[in-house]
Amino acid sequence: MNGQALRGLLILVGAFVLCFAVFLALGPPRAEGAPQVDSVFFATIVAGTYSLTSLAAILVARGVLGLFVDFSRPVTFFQVLGSITDPMIALCEPVTPGFVEPPLKPFLAAFWLYFLKVLVFGIGSVPPPWIFVLLALG
């Protein structure tokens, strides 16, 4: 694994840890008559969903901007956005097909992150796919 991909993995883990700490401190929402939810379980699910979705959204923004703007310009915004998204693109590089053009790689990296989010945490109230396998095995 090259240095860029390792840095992308550190960004991904750092975003999760930061979100986990925030949601653990806030705790689950309290509603009258609703079942109680364990704070650690709530923070894990919400932090994973939030961190992967927000990083995917940043990659989509990078992809849209990259279609119109050259990121080699010496503008601070582009340098910061590139320093966050370049490692994420490098992290998804092993599963990216070779025929994908470089301006489209942020979109594919965003797809892989969102796919990972759906695979691990599910979508909204729909549980992740591996839950159905466990239920079928029984």
Image (cartoon, rainbow, N blue to C red):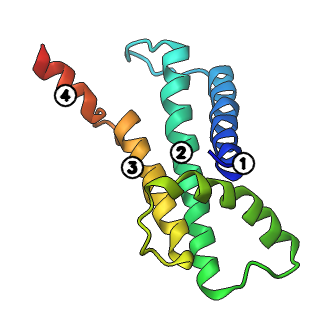
Choose mark 1 or mark 2, whichever is in front.
1
Residue linked to disc 1: 3
Q: Nearer the viewer, residue 92 or 58?
A: 92
Q: Name the residue under label 4.
A: 132
Q: Earlier in the sequence, mark 1 or mark 2?
A: 1
- Residue nearer the viewer, 15 or 19: 15
Q: Distance between the residues labelled 3 and 2?
A: 9 Å
Q: Give how far across and how far down residue 136 sits, in percent.
A: 11, 22
Give the residue pinned by disc 2: 52
Disc on the earlier residue, 3 or 4: 3
> From the viewer's perspective, is 108 left or right of 14?
left
Report, in whole angstroms, how far the alpha carbon at label 2 lies from the one at label 4: 22 Å
In the image, what residue occupies the spot 50% across and 59% down?
Answer: 110
Seen from this angle, which residue lies furthest bottom? 68
Q: Is residue 106 above or below residue 90?
A: below
Q: How many residues crowd around disc 2 within 10 Å: few (fewer than 14), some, or many (20 or more)? A: many
Q: Position of residue 23 (x, y in %)?
A: 62, 27
Which residue is nearer to you in this view: 116 or 51? 116
From the image, tell me which residue sits under label 3: 115
CA distance separating discs 4 and 1: 37 Å
Closer to the N terminus: mark 1 or mark 3? Answer: 1
